Image (cartoon, grey):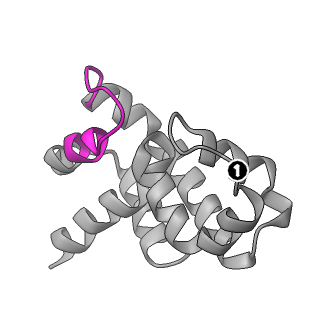
Amino acid sequence: MLKNIFAISVVMFLSATSAMAQQAAAAACAADIKSLCAGVQPGEGRIKACITSHFKDLSAPCQAVVLEAAAVGKACQDDVKKLCAGVQPGGGRIEACMKSHLADISASCKDAMTQAAAGKS
């Protein structure tokens, strides 16, 4: 059960280094994205850049998701570099790689993902 929760956390919160971040943020930030980034073409990090540039204008729930994603991304960036060095970002490939290496993920990355999954940053 705990392993399943952790796997879900990986998929949901490892987003600062992948397209999944944009998807997780999009779910919590849909209204904000629609109003603040309406003319932005998705892809190549453009929505993420728009959200970042309008951070102060985002709703509180959206800000929380963005901060959680950033915290997890920072805590897990070394793990991604080490465990998934040859993996091309995009299309869920980083998430799949990290999920396949759950046993090898550092304690700090696991802690960040657990806190994010619990709604803490």
Q: In this rendering, is residue 15 above or below 59?
A: above
Farthest residue to the right: give it. Answer: 56
Is 115 within the magenta?
A: no
Q: Which residue is mark 1?
A: 39
Q: In this rendering, is residue 82 above or below 33?
A: above
Name the image quarter holding the C terminus: bottom right
Q: Judging from the image, what secondary structure is the residue with disc 1 in?
A: loop
Residue positioned 59% across, 67% down in the render: 65
Q: Is 84 displayed left or right of 29 in the figure?
A: left
The answer to which of 58 and 103 lies nearer the viewer is 58
Farthest residue to the top: give it. Answer: 86
Residue positioned 79% across, 47% down in the render: 53
Q: Position of residue 116 (x, y in %)?
A: 49, 68
Q: To which quarter of the image does residue 49 belong?
A: top right
Q: To which quarter of the image does residue 36 belong?
A: bottom right
Residue positioned 36% across, 51% down in the render: 107
Q: Magenta segment, which residues?
A: 84-98
Q: Is residue 89 visible?
A: yes
Q: Is 58 displayed left or right of 84 in the figure?
A: right
Is 92 within the magenta?
A: yes
Q: Is residue 108 visible?
A: no
Q: Position of residue 23 (x, y in %)?
A: 45, 59
Q: Position of residue 63 (x, y in %)?
A: 70, 67
